[in-house]
Amino acid sequence: MPFPIHRMRRLRASEPIRRLVRETRLSPAQFILPLFICPGKGVRREISAMPGHAQMSVDEAVRECAEAQSLGIGGVILFGLPETKDDTASGAYAEDGIVQRALRAIKRETPQLLVMTDVCNCEYTSHGHCGKIAAGDVDGHVDNDETLKWLAATSVSHARAGADIVAPSDMMDGRVGAIREALDEASLVETPIMAYSAKYASCFYGPFREAAGTASGFGHRKTYQMDPANGHEAIREVTLDASEGADVIMVKPALAYLDVIGALRQAFDLPLAAYHVSGEYSMVMAAAANGWIDGDAVAREHLLAIRRAGADFVLTYFARTVAESLR
């Protein structure tokens, strides 16, 4: 029936009514907090491009995880900054690597906290790319199939050290299948894989490159990360990852790719994650610092939009502050 029989404003008249009919809700349990782990003890090195975040030593990360657990945050994802880097990313799969040490310490102190690990090579290679580069290559062409061996070894090492979920972010073809096979052969059949299935070659990663020390010395990542112009290609990527055994799929970045999140939600019944990336975080923080926006309110609206588009949970640098505000 037309107006005046139906008045849409009736269900907006008060906060109790609005809350009753709200379609999308936020909970700290839907957030994953990224953490950057560095060598040393008692180290907490602020990241200038990401106010409120820091590179932290293992002991500091343990404290951060205890706080995250107390806030009801769904979990953390670890990124490692190794003592040294080399052409073979050996720090990524070393049994005493920085992430492996952090995993053992965190699981010892907060065993019930969900801990994911980023599985990639860019933090560990001397050239900053996500895999093996042939000697003399100045274009950043990654050897896909050789890199799969590194990713598989890293995943097994992380799972043995205590990772609840391993999350390959490299965008190599066939990586999910290679990792699944390696985990199963190592009797780690219960370890899930969260694939960065639709990871775009985005301009929004700039602050992360400072945080994780992953700026490439030459070339670019456009030969393995997705073209931002492509949406249908994400369906193909997820279809392949699902066929290889991905337990969770992800879109990265989130805000500029809400259409992709929505399309994947309609096409697949796998759990769907989205990464609210560093550039999206830093833009809000910069605008808030200048008094142009209410940073807390915008952060919540961002996360609502990502959830409304179809993401089951969100990796976000706002996890801690929004969890506190929701309390």
Image (cartoon, rainbow, N blue to C red):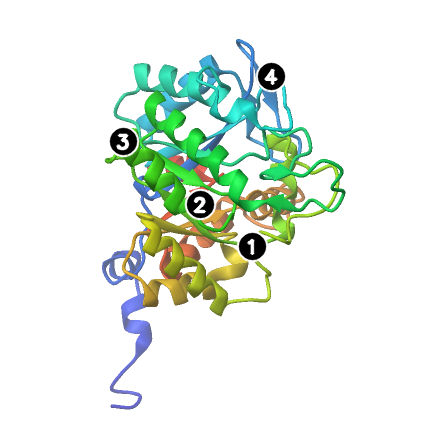
> How far from the left and from the top, in percent, is residue 246?
34, 48
Tell me the kind of residue under disc 1: Tyr
Q: Single out the mark in the foreground, 4 or 3.
A: 3
- Nearest to N terminus: mark 4 or mark 3: 4
* Alpha carbons under labels 2 and 1: distance apart: 16 Å
Secondary structure category for the residue under label 2 = helix
Binning the other alpha carbons within 10 Å of mark 1 as few (below 14), some (14 to 19) or many (20 upward) gives many
Residue found 60% across the figure and 61% down from its top? 227
Q: Tag 3: residue type?
A: Leu
The quadrant of the rendering that contains the N terminus is bottom left
The number of numbered badges drawn on the structure is 4
Mark 4 sits on what residue? 83
Q: Residues within 10 Å of mark 4 (few under 14, many from 20)?
A: few
- Secondary structure beneath dot 4 equals loop
Secondary structure beneath dot 3 equals loop
Mark 1 / mark 4, whichever is N-terminal? 4
Left or right side of 325 for 208: right
Earlier in the chain: of badge 3 and badge 2, it is 2
How far apart in space, not on screen, are marks 1 and 4 (Cα)?
29 Å
The label nearer to you, 2 versus 4, is 2
Residue behind mark 3:
188
Residue 104 position by quadrant: top left
